[in-house]
């Protein structure tokens, strides 16, 4: 499963909107949405912004489950 898909599932499970995440990590909503729907890859810089906005460890999305 891609990191984007894992982030998408995390947002849904925790009631966090993509709009909120976009505003809090500084990634434009269309770009974020495309990443979460696996239409583009998340860059390392974007990934760092996302985990900082969500205040989670990178392993939340990197480790296999």
Image (spheres, grey):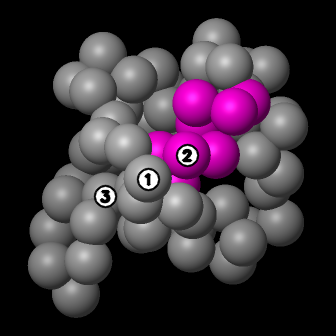
Query: Can residue 48 be seen in the rendering of this structure?
Result: no
Residue at disc 1, secondary structure: loop
Mark 1, residue position: 39
Judged left or right of residue 45, residue 65 is: left
Mark 3, residue position: 3
Sequence-wise first label, 2 or 1: 2
Cα distance in 3D space between marks 1 and 3:
12 Å
Q: Residue at left 68%, top 19%? A: 28
Q: Which-is-in-front pick, marks 3 and 2?
A: 2
Q: Nearer the viewer, residue 16 or 36?
A: 36
Residue at disc 2, secondary structure: helix
Q: Is residue 58 magenta?
A: no
Q: Which mark is residue 18?
A: none
Q: How many marks?
A: 3
Q: Identify the image quadrant of the N terminus.
A: bottom left
- The residue range painted magenta reads 29-36
Bin the neighbour count of mark 3 within 10 Å (Cα to Cα): few under 14, some 14-19, many 20 and up: some
Mark 2, residue position: 34
Q: Nearer the viewer, residue 34 or 52?
A: 34
């Amino acid at each position: 499963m891609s990191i984007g898909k894992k982030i998408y599932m995390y947002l849904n499970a925790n009631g966090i909107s993509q709009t909120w995440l976009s505003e809090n990590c500084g990634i434009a909503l269309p770009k974020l949405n495309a990443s979460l729907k696996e239409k583009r890859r998340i860059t390392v810089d974007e990934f760092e912004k996302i985990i900082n906005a969500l205040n989670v460890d990178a392993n939340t999305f990197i480790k296999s489950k």
